[in-house]
């Protein structure tokens, strides 16, 4: 029995081999199918989730390595009122996706970036998103959506500075 | 006949379809034949399901629309693999229905070709094949709702208007929502198609706008949508191992040892069935995907490769090198006398172009779920061609077609790969041995080793110029592949309409097919995705040789505005071609002064009835490191359905074209693919993505599809720019083979 903290909840996993990639535990054992299988060798980023806020390729992280930290998957982004985060909303508003298969990973990478750097320039975006392939080629929209989300997050903080405890100015 | 040939036949028919289904000319009977719908009171899919006789609270005037007190549902009939049809096709219905888009719920339709007509994601055909029938479906429902409102309000139908899901009586200020009229409308007869008035494009309120994809909210929440996301109670998980060289059969395997591994439920060998595209292999069924993948590492199979592929890229490259100086076996195009015109030319230009095989590399590896229950085989499939898959499974299992049910799921990319339903027959063969549902999961390595590849190819092209620098002769000796020694593989079929046939008096395409056993299949813009590179690069070579401006030469070749096939609105129109070339050139600032090492390159290509020109702004450094700063595209595919989706397809095609041109090559030795994953098959990343500038010419022709035609012009546009910037002509793809990389 392994215990994981995922999206703020404690989840028990029966019979998991500690070397099983986190991705397959999420998908097959816990029913969290947002993270996707693309390559299995950490080259495409479709399986990206956050471990203690940092993007990791869950296809190549043994589940045992995730037991100590907090895992966030795309299912954990929208808040309890079910409102989309600025990143998710920007993805919808800009109609970023084509097939959409990579986009959960892209959104997780973008979420981690904006948590670290609320106003990234193009180079910072390109660098942070370099591990996430989009076979459909939606990169220009992804880049734009990150900027829109950054702007929105900024606006939201200005509107309610108490929410994350700081004045953006 | 086997499954690959069948697929190839389909691709050829898709090439032919544009000619046959010219929407404004086709007879009703022919239209119904093409879309697979027969009978019914009206055109396509109009079935009343016996509802006219009884009072009903649900209004279903046809298969596409269902209105009841709770809302308005529109069925999306074709598979969604990223081309946007789950949004764009229902938009067409909604426009004629005159419903507010926000009122509409879109649902993926059942796989039922009797009700919905041919269901396919392929050939950029979803919009052109369904344009008329979807508009008629919406208009018929609207007419019935108006009829119901007329009765209810006691006024003439002619006094009523519709807007935002309401029937409105302007003079009295009264209105009724469609959901309030469903009961009454359901009792009315469906009008004849001929009696319907379809909107003029100037009346559109929805079409042409930017509409976000109907699945986007579910996508960003990570909800289950894709084939790989399917789960069923009690479901098991399977892998399937095939011989690395296609055609190898199982002699023996250590099944007993594998069955003893943790989490493994069963392991067994499956014989092949070439007619339905099932290759022999070994299935491992386990309690989880990882248990199956882990167990597979211990699997040892002895293969009999006596009839397996032994294809070798180095061998065919050498063979083509020999053949290129000799006349080809056939002449798919032979206008005038190309040899004589070449001999008479004032200047002769020749070049040898080559390109490698390529993988589809759709990001979601193949998978499929199946469950044998209650005498049927039910599948959950991310396929581009569900009807074919259903038939293949029925044939494999000896079932009547109604005993095979297919649930269409979203595909994580298609690009033509999911037209071949090998994953469906494999999972059906596995599920047929089990009493529980099973999901088959391919690994990326499975996917890359058992693709239906885009064929490589070789072209010796020669052309003649007269003293004024006009093109007088064109001869392309095309060397491709054949699996049966006769018919070229998919992507190796030359259309008799390939440009510049039709604009040159002396034009010949010769063709020779080398023996090849590994399957090839349609890959986004089949044929065109490589022919465009050869043709449009070589035309630039001619402009350089003639000392002429590329744009000017291209426009001269188009000549007077005309259809190159008279009376066919899906043929190349030289005026539309000139229109996009001029627009792209103008928007990109063609002819302007550029800094050293930086240049513009131009290309045009016509495919899938789309006229598209692209200009690439490229710089190259001394180490052959390339920066593509911007690509400007001008596109004429008629009226735009969803502006956001259309623009996205063009943007994505440009990135796909760049990615493939740059570094993607699949090579073979001894029948084995030498690349296995993305570490050896690089895909473009965000930092190398150019600025993309997309312009539409919304001409007043029937709309055509946009999943494919924006890809072919990209590679020649970039390579022409590289030549202008550096003086080095690239004649092979991927260009990494000539030492180029992205800066």
Image (spheres, coloured by chain):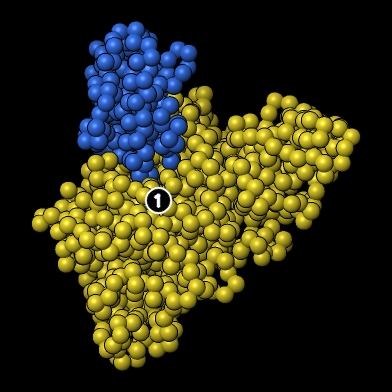
Q: Position of residue B496 (x, y in %)?
A: 47, 74
Q: Position of residue B89 (x, y in %)?
A: 58, 45
Q: For the point 40% across and 85% down, which residue is it?
A: B506
- Front residue of B23 and A154: A154
- Front residue of A76 and B212: B212
Q: For the point 34% across and 10% down, which residue is it?
A: A161
Q: On the rendered structure, is B295 left or right of B421? A: left
Residue B287 shows in this picture: no
What chain is tagged by disc 1?
B
Spot the blue chain and give its letter.
A
Residue tagged 1:
B694
Q: How many numbered tags mark residues here?
A: 1
Q: For the point 41% across and 81% down, which residue is it?
A: B504
Q: On the rendered structure, is B395 left or right of B733? A: right
- Front residue of B232 and B215: B215
| As drawn, B387 above or below B377 | below
Spot the yellow chain and give its letter.
B
Check disc 1 and report its element: helix, strand or loop: strand
């Amino acid at each position: 029995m392994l215990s994981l903290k995922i999206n703020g909840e404690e989840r028990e996993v029966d019979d998991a081999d500690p070397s099983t990639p986190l991705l397959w535990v999420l998908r097959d054992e816990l029913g969290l199918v947002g993270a996707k299988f693309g390559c299995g060798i950490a080259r495409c980023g479709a399986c990206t989730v956050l471990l203690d806020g940092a993007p990791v390729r869950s296809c190549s992280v043994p589940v045992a390595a995730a037991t100590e930290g907090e895992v966030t998957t795309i299912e954990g982004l929208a808040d309890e009122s079910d409102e989309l985060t600025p990143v998710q909303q920007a993805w919808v508003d800009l109609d970023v996706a084509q097939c959409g298969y990579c986009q959960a990973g892209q959104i997780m990478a973008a979420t981690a970036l904006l948590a670290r750097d609320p106003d990234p320039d193009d180079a910072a975006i390109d660098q942070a998103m370099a591990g996430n392939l989009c076979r459909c080629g939606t990169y220009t929209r992804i880049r734009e959506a990150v900027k829109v989300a950054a702007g929105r997050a900024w606006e939201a903080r200005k509107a309610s500075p108490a929410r994350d405890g700081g004045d953006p100015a | 006949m086997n499954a690959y040939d069948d697929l190839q036949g389909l691709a050829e028919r898709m090439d032919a379809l544009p000619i046959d289904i010219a929407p404004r000319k086709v007879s009703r009977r022919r239209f119904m034949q093409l879309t697979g719908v027969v009978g019914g009171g009206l055109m396509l899919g109009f079935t009343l399901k016996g509802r006219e006789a009884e009072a009903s609270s649900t209004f279903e005037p046809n298969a596409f629309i269902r209105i009841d007190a709770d809302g308005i549902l529109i069925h999306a009939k074709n598979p969604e693999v990223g081309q946007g049809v789950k949004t764009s096709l229902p938009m067409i219905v909604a426009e004629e229905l005159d419903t507010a888009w926000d009122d509409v719920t879109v649902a993926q339709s059942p796989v039922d070709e009797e009700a919905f007509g041919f269901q396919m994601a392929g050939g950029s055909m979803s919009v052109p094949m369904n344009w008329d029938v979807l508009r008629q479906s919406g208009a018929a429902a609207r007419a019935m709702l108006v009829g119901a409102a007329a009765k209810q309000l006691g006024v003439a139908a002619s006094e009523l208007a519709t807007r935002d899901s309401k029937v409105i009586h302007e003079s009295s200020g009264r209105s009724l929502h469609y959901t309030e009229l469903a009961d009454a409308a359901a009792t009315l007869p469906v009008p004849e198609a001929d009696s319907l008035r379809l909107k003029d494009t100037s009346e559109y309120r929805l079409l042409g706008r930017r509409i976000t994809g109907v699945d986007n909210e579910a996508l960003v929440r990570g909800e289950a949508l894709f084939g790989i996301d399917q789960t069923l109670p009690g479901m098991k998980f399977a892998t399937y191992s095939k011989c690395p060289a296609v055609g190898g059969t199982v002699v023996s395997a250590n099944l007993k040892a594998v069955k003893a591994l943790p989490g493994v439920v069963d392991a067994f060998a499956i014989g092949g069935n070439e007619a339905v595209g099932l290759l022999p292999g070994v299935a491992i069924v386990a309690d989880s995907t990882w248990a199956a993948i882990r167990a597979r590492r211990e699997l040892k199979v002895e293969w009999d490769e006596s009839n397996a592929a032994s294809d070798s890229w180095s061998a065919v490259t050498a063979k083509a090198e020999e053949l290129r100086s000799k006349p080809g076996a056939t002449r798919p195009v032979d206008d005038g006398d190309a040899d004589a015109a070449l001999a008479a030319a004032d200047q002769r230009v020749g070049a040898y172009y080559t390109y490698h095989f390529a993988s589809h590399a759709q990001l979601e590896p193949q998978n499929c779920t199946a469950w044998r229950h209650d005498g049927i085989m039910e599948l959950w499939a991310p396929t581009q061609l569900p009807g074919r898959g259903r038939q293949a499974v029925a044939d494999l299992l000896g079932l009547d077609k109604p005993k095979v049910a297919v649930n269409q799921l979203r595909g994580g990319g298609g690009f033509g790969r999911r037209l071949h339903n090998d994953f469906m027959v494999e999972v059906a063969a596995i599920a047929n041995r089990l009493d529980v549902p099973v999901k088959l999961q391919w690994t990326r390595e499975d996917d890359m080793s058992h693709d239906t590849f885009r064929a490589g190819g070789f072209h010796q092209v020669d052309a003649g110029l007269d003293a004024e620098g006009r093109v007088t002769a064109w001869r392309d000796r095309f060397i491709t592949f054949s699996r049966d020694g006769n018919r070229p593989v998919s992507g190796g079929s030359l259309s008799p309409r390939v440009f510049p046939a039709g604009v040159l008096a002396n034009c010949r395409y010769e063709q020779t097919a080398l023996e090849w056993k590994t399957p090839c299949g349609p890959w986004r813009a089949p044929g065109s995705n490589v022919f465009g590179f050869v043709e449009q690069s070589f035309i630039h070579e001619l402009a350089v040789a003639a000392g002429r401006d590329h744009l000017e030469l291209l426009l001269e070749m188009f000549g007077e505005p005309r259809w190159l096939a008279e009376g066919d609105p899906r043929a190349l129109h030289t005026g539309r071609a000139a229109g996009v070339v001029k627009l792209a050139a103008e928007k990109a600032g063609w002819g302007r002064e550029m800094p050293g090492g930086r240049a513009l390159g131009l290309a045009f290509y016509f495919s899938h009835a789309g006229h598209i020109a692209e200009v690439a702004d490229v710089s190259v450094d001394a180490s052959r490191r390339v920066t593509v700063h911007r690509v400007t595209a001008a596109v004429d595919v008629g009226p735009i359905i969803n502006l956001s989706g259309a623009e996205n397809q063009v943007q994505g095609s440009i990135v796909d074209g760049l990615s493939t041109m740059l570094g993607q090559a699949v090579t073979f030795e001894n029948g084995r693919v030498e690349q296995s994953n993305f570490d050896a098959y690089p895909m473009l990343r965000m930092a190398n993505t150019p600025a993309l500038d997309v312009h539409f010419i919304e001409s007043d022709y029937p709309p055509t599809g946009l999943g494919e035609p924006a890809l072919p012009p990209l590679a020649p546009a970039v390579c022409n720019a590289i030549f202008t910037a550096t003086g080095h002509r690239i004649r092979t793809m991927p260009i990494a083979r000539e030492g180029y990389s992205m800066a």
